[in-house]
Image (spheres, helix red, strand yellow):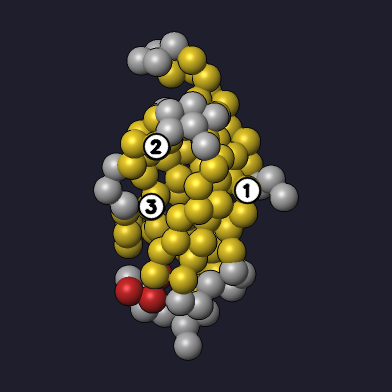
Amino acid sequence: MQICNISTQNANYKQDIIFNILRVFPIPVQDELYVEYQLDNTNEGYFQIHYLLGKELFRTLPLNQESEAYRQSFAVNNFITSSGIYMLTIHFGESQVSKKIHFLKN
């Protein structure tokens, strides 16, 4: 199931930067969040989790990744302290996409 397909022109690379979020699971998230995605071009990016109003809770270090499929996991119970709806934002090159995640605290 494809959730999002982003294509933008990046002046630095003079090529399309395309990434697909294939799956974000489980829903609701309890301890660990998994994101499966595909990069069509090599690029640098990072993941960010924040409140709906924008305050950042977590950001990965910059990732320089080749063109291929990836599965990233996050131990969200380390930085999310209460049940609720949060945003996962994925940045690669000049592109970004956000997805709501539902967190259920045990």
- Mark number displayed over residue 99: none
Residue designated by label 3: 48
Give the residue type at disc 3.
Answer: Gln
Q: Nearer the viewer, mark 1 or mark 3?
A: 1
> What residue is drawn where x is 63% and y is 42%?
4
Does 24 appear above or below 65? below
User: Reading the chain from its start, which is encountered first: label 1 or label 3?
Assistant: 1
Residue designated by label 1: 22
The percent coordinates of residue 58 (x first, y second) are: 32, 59
Q: Give the secondary structure at mark 1.
A: strand
Asked whether the beta carbons under mark 3 and mark 2 sit within 8 Å of each other, the answer is no
Residue 52, visible in the rendered structure: no
Does 50 appear above or below 22? below
- Mark number displayed over residue 65: 2
User: Gap in Å between the C-alphas at discs 2 and 1?
Assistant: 16 Å
Alpha-carbon neighbours of circle 3 within 10 Å: few (<14), some, or many (≥20)? some
